Amino acid sequence: MNTCHFCGGELKEQLTTFLYEDDGQFWLVRNVPAFVCAQCGEKEFSRATTKQVLTLLRQPPRPVEILHVPAYDMALS
């Protein structure tokens, strides 16, 4: 059994969302294989999967959807 490095919970393989931020720009890639902790929700991506996603984002195809999300700043509260 693989265990979470943060809480020790069981890691389960499933598809999840990969969120990447660089210089204030955000990219979201859905349906990415990962190991997700059943206890705390922490995600672990394999080196190969991370490389594949970052390669995709260097020459991204047309997005399937454009999202508009609220942004908050803890320093201002």
Image: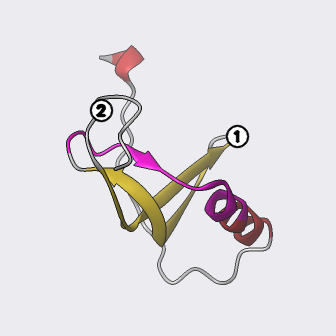
- Establish if 59 lies above or below 62: above
Residues 58 and 35: in front is 35
Residues 75 and 34: in front is 34
Q: In this view, does 51 lie to the left or right of 32?
A: right
Please tell me in which quadrant of the rendered image residue 60 appears: bottom right
Q: In this view, does 2 lie to the left or right of 18?
A: left
Please tell me in which quadrant of the rendered image residue 3 appears: top left
Q: Residue at x 49, y 69 (%)?
A: 32
Q: Where is residue 69 in the image (x, y as percent from the top left)?
A: 37, 55
Examine the structure image and report whether residue 50 is included in the region drawn in magenta.
yes
Provide the residue span drawn in magenta: 39-51
Q: Name the residue under label 2.
A: 8
Amino acid at dot 2: Gly
- Establish if 24 lies above or below 1: above
Q: Name the residue under label 1.
A: 23
Q: Where is residue 61 in the image (x, y as percent from the top left)?
A: 69, 82
Quarter of the image where the C terminus is located? top left
Q: Element type at marker 2?
A: loop
Q: Which residue is drawn at 28% across and 46% down?
A: 41
Q: Position of residue 75 (x, y in %)?
A: 40, 15
Q: Distance between the residues labelled 2 and 1?
A: 32 Å
